[in-house]
Amino acid sequence: MAARKAPNIADYFSGAKQTQQLSNAEEEIAQLKTEIERLRASDSEEVEVQLSTLKEQLKSQSGVVDLEITKIIQNPDQPRRTFLNESIVAMSQSLASDGQLSPIIVIAQEDESYLLFDGERRWRAARELGWSTIKAVTMDAPQELHRKALLTSLHREDLNPLDKAEAIIKEISLNVGLKVDDIPRALSTVIRRLNKKKRLSEVMAKLASNDSSQTVEVDPNYVNETEHNVLRILLELQLNPASVDANLLPMLGLADDLKDAIRNLGLKGVHAIALQKLSAKNLNLSQAKAKRVREDLTKKVVQENLSVLQTRKLVNEAIAKHSPSQESTIDANKQLGKIKQSVDLISSDLLRSADPTILRDVYDLLKQKMTEIESLIS
């Protein structure tokens, strides 16, 4: 596969370079100083107003400024949605002992608020410390804000696979027009088809070797237009579509309690996939009981920092413990079949002829069994 030129993220998001771009270098500051002196030498009635404006401009163009934390709002296009409490505590300790070593990056809004673009962990930690201001640099809102925010976070090792998968799906949805729920199926379908036809490497190389701004001709017998666009976006993000399909998209189908564990407990994605096998069907339990089993084992995995192999062993043991053997299942089915036939034989005449006390006993027994059945099938 031809090598692809990676996006120069530093041009957009490096704190030092961003500061330099925002200040427009010392030459522009010197020009502002000259303009101030020119205004001072004139007798214009608007001199003081303009002086005030230029001073504020000069202050902002000095690079880093102190912004009120309450004026900074979270970015809805931020791919990272997980901020573990331990991480915020560690950052708070760092800020308290060493101060803020690098500014956050914000985007000025029309209502005089600032949209947080980069540095949310520092911002959260500063709020926890009770700081009233935080050092920041301001940038103009870029086009394709979600794409730019995604590129700043996507290849960081500490971005968990669930956040990464959701951000990738959102980026594809914004550009291709597919519904979020339809994207995993579209990607899996084209990957399977290309693998079956042994054309995956060929198509990926062809897509990767073309300028993303140009129309790429791909054999429609193997890749339709929508699939082509999905693959193109993944390659532009420097991602392997087959790897995304195999390792990231399964995160979207995890049980809600496992997603919560990834975000709040630091559960790893591969461990979550292993724990996903603890379903109601595999455990032969109700949804509620299966969830409790899954949550208990999830806490054990996180607290004891178990390996993937250890986690899989725990999962298999849990399934074996709760699942009946095939022989006992067959025997139970036979007995229940006979009971069902007996119940079917109960006629209205028989019920009318029975002693009311006996009827009450039968009613209470059936009611109790119905409650047990409902707990198993709900």
Image (cartoon, rainbow, N blue to C red):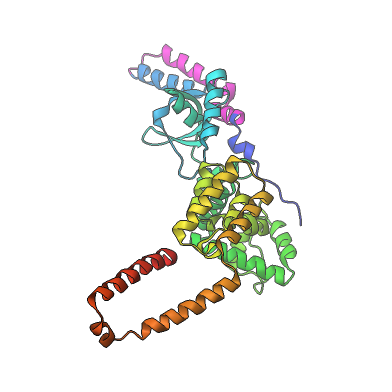
The structure residue drawn at horizontal position 55% and vertical position 48%, both measured from the top left corner, is 298
The structure residue drawn at horizontal position 56% and vertical position 49%, both measured from the top left corner, is 297
Q: Nearer the viewer, residue 72 or 96?
A: 96
Quadrant location of the N terminus in the rendered image: bottom right
Where does the image place residue 23, in percent across and percent down from the top left?
A: 55, 26
Q: Nearer the viewer, residue 111 or 327?
A: 327
Q: Is residue 307 above or below residue 193?
A: above
Q: Quadrant of residue 14?
A: top right
Residue 178 appears in the picture as rendered: no
Q: Quadrant of residue 50?
A: top left
The structure residue drawn at horizontal position 58% and vertical position 23%, both measured from the top left corner, is 101
Q: Is residue 14 magenta?
A: no
Where does the image place residue 199, in percent across and percent down from the top left?
A: 73, 68
Decide whether the magenta segment is chiefly helix, strand or loop: helix
Q: Is residue 27 magenta?
A: yes
Quadrant location of the C terminus in the rendered image: bottom left
Q: Is residue 205 above or below residue 148?
A: below
Q: Which residues are magenta?
A: 16-45
Q: Nearer the viewer, residue 197 or 42?
A: 197
Residue 115 appears in the picture as rendered: yes
Q: Nearer the viewer, residue 165 or 44?
A: 165
Where does the image place residue 99, in percent across and percent down from the top left?
A: 54, 20
Q: Is residue 60 above or below residue 337?
A: above
The structure residue drawn at horizontal position 44% and vertical position 22%, both measured from the top left corner, is 131
Where does the image place residue 32, in percent across and percent down from the top left?
A: 50, 20
| Tag count | 0
Q: Is residue 51 left or right of residue 220?
A: left
Q: Is residue 60 above or below residue 347?
A: above
Q: Is residue 104 left or right of residue 17?
A: left
